[in-house]
Image (cartoon, helix red, strand yellow):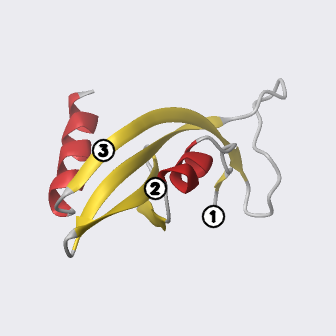
Amino acid sequence: MLFWVGVFYRLHQRRKRLIPVHIKTIDCPVARADGSPVTYGDSRPVLMRCVREIALREARGHLAWEFIEYTVGVPGVRFRSCASLLDAMSSFNAAPEPVRLA
């Protein structure tokens, strides 16, 4: 847990003036490169932990909403600027996209 607190801290330190507003973890299904789901032997889907966040970013004197998403154990963080809090919340509450295996 301390490792992830450190990752969260560094993420917000590198992108100055990024204020977390909402954060949650969700289970994301895993899919093969062709889009077919990865399952265990008993047909249960393989899941990975994903983190979603809504943050308020200050840029050039004004505030902007940003949706942030990343998968635990997979390199890379996805950032998307949002027009409003409502726009960010729709992405925040959407069904998870499958994590694709290469």
Q: Say which of marks 3 and 1 sits in front.
A: 3
* Above/below status of 29 relative to 98: above
- Indicate left or right for 74 with 96 as reference: left
Name the residue carrying label 2: 67
Tell whether label 2 touches label 1 (CB within 8 Å).
no
Residue 79: x and y, percent? 43, 63
Q: Residue at x 17, y 62 (%)?
A: 14
Amino acid tagged 3? Pro
* Above/below status of 52 relative to 27: below
Nearest the viewer among 25 and 98 is: 25
Residue 75 lies in quadrant: bottom left
Q: Which mark is residue 20?
A: 3
Nearest the viewer among 4 and 38 is: 4
Amino acid tagged 2? Phe
The 10 Å Cα crowd at callout 1, few under 14, some 14 to 19, many 20 or more, is few
User: How far separated are the C-alphas under marks 3 and 1?
Assistant: 31 Å
- Indicate left or right for 14 with 30 as reference: left
User: How far separated are the C-alphas under marks 3 and 2?
Assistant: 10 Å
User: How far separated are the C-alphas under marks 1 and 2?
Assistant: 25 Å
* Above/below status of 73 relative to 26: below
Tell whether label 2 touches label 3 (CB within 8 Å).
no
Residue 28 lies in quadrant: top right
Residue 72: x and y, percent? 44, 43
Nearest the viewer among 44 and 94 is: 94
Name the residue carrying label 1: 102
Q: Which residue is drawn at 48% across and 33% down?
A: 25
Amino acid tagged 1? Ala
Residue 56: x and y, percent? 32, 54
The 10 Å Cα crowd at callout 3, few under 14, some 14 to 19, many 20 or more, is some
- Indicate left or right for 37 with 10 as reference: right
Say whether disc 1 or disc 2 marks the residue closer to the N-terminus.
2
Mark 2 lies on a secondary structure that is strand
